[in-house]
Amino acid sequence: MLLKEKSMELFELNQKNDSILEMLSEDAMFTDLLFIMSKKKGNQEKYIAGIEIGAERFVYRPEERKKVIAFKDIQIKKKYCCLLEPGIEAFIISKLNEGYNLYYMNIDMHSCLWNYIDHSLDVIGTVSKGLYVYLHFCKKTGINSQLLAYHTGLPVNDILYVFIDNQFEDFNILISEDIGDKKLILGIRHIVIFNKQGHEEAEDLIYRVTVFNKYDYSIEYNDYHGNIDNAYADYKNHFFGLSYSYYIEKEKADNETIQAFQNIIEE
């Protein structure tokens, strides 16, 4: 079931890319396509593409008055400037953070983005939504540290492990479970409590139980706990509930598959 859903998702992604490419080909001359992003605004869809013309790289925005901007002239919003180093990588992540979806990115741009994220670990949390949208796209399309290391010939740190397998939104993952298209996490974070004078007064642990959709990283459940017993009880309740729902859906899908097969052999 999951394999079928993933195949359909990739098929729809390729269809989307083909339609966007056709539109771009009619409006812009380019020698290479670097990335495609889009965002729905009302009944319209806004596109942003990275294109290469000769040796120069540009951001192409068909709906804007100034359609083409060189990578070196790209600006990011002021709210990001104080923490993120400006550049095309920060521009892409910030746009994903604001609701754009990524539909295509070539391997060179992936290499640049992974390197940028790896060197921005202490501040990249300011655009956590954009970060997880990008990492989900990487998982969906098979981009990983081994592939990028092979492509670049250089060591590449595994940011998928850092942000997905080991951590989720500043919480270290204590235990987790993949159940169908959902991921259930029990996370833990160390916090320091200060008094009114700004002096450290105490240290504590906070626990977070999260359920999110693995396909779009939308959070479907989120709750915080002050002790491990309550957190673990919450985790187990969701584990059994999600497992039962997945079993019912899987049984239904399997029954339909068997019924379809029986119909074929009876003809």
Image (cartoon, rainbow, N blue to C red):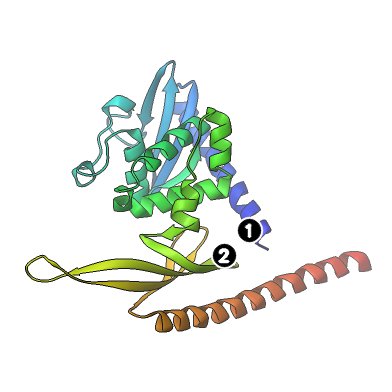
Image location (x, y in percent) of residue 39: 39, 48
Amino acid type shown at disc 1: Glu
Residue 266: name its quadrant.
Answer: bottom right
- Give the quadrant of the N terminus: bottom right
Q: Nearer the viewer, mark 1 or mark 2?
A: 2
Q: Are marks 1 and 2 in contact (CB under 8 Å)?
A: yes
Using the image, tell me which numbered label, if any, was put on residue 239.
Answer: none
CA distance for labels 1 and 2: 9 Å
Image location (x, y in percent) of residue 59: 36, 30
Residue 171: name its quadrant.
Answer: bottom left
Helix, strand or loop under label 1? helix
Image location (x, y in percent) of residue 235: 48, 78
Q: Residues within 10 Å of mark 1 (few under 14, many from 20)?
A: few
Image location (x, y in percent) of residue 182: 54, 67
Residue closer to the observer: 167 or 244:
167
Q: Residue under circle 2?
A: 181
Lower sequence index among marks 1 and 2: 1
Residue at the limit of the structure toward the left, as seen here: 197
Helix, strand or loop under label 2? loop
Q: Residue under circle 1?
A: 5
Residue 63: name its quadrant.
Answer: top left
- Please say whether residue 28 is visible from this viewpoint: no
Q: Residue at x 50, y 39 (%)?
A: 104
Amino acid type shown at disc 2: Asp
Residue at the limit of the structure toward the right, as seen here: 266
- Please say whether residue 90 is visible from this viewpoint: yes
Q: Residue at x 57, y 45 (%)?
A: 141
| Direction from residue 190 to residue 139 in the image, left or right | right
